[in-house]
Amino acid sequence: MVIFMSLEHLILLILIVLVGVLFFKLTFKILRYLAINTIVGLILVGILNFLGVTHIHLNLINLLIIAIGGVIGVFILIIMSLL
């Protein structure tokens, strides 16, 4: 009876560790995707602002749109700024 209890605890511990590792891997992939989108979007906004094509202010809401949408988010902001 004691052997089965310790085996159950070991299986539970292994499952908890596997879920934790999977959680951190997925979180890292999502953060990496957002970071790449943000960098590409900010470079695009910087180039467009420098060339005078449009003038997009960088505030928290615009940064979130750029971070989540990337290049598509920048185009959404351009269309919104032209309206």
Image (tube, rainbow, N blue to C red):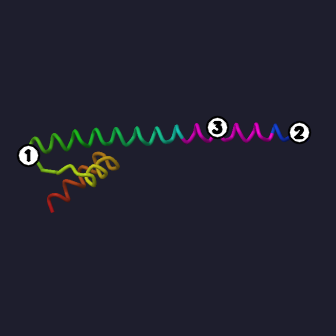
Could you tell me how far apart the alpha carbons at marks 3 and 2 are, in whole angstroms? 23 Å
Q: CA distance from mark 3 to mark 1?
A: 52 Å
Amino acid type, residue under disc 2 in the picture: Val
Mark found first going from the N terminus, 3 or 1: 3
Decide if residue 48 is on the left or right side of residue 70.
left
Position of residue 38 measured from the top left corner of the image (x, y, whole percent): 30, 42
Secondary structure under the numbered disc 1 in the rendered image: loop
Residue corresponding to mark 3 = 17
Q: Which residue is mark 2?
A: 2
Name which residue type carries label 3: Val
Q: Residue furthest left?
A: 52
Left or right, residue 42 beside residue 18: left
- Residue that appears at 24% across and 42% down: 42
Report helix, strand or loop for mark 2: helix
Name the foreground residue: 16 vs 44: 16
Q: What is the magenta range?
A: 8-23
Q: Main secondary structure of the magenta part?
A: helix
Compared across the picture, whether 36 is left or right of 62 comes to right
Q: Nearer the viewer, mark 3 or mark 2?
A: 2
Q: Residue at x 44, y 42 (%)?
A: 30
User: Disc 2 to disc 1, how far (Cα)?
Assistant: 74 Å
Is 17 part of what is drawn in magenta?
yes
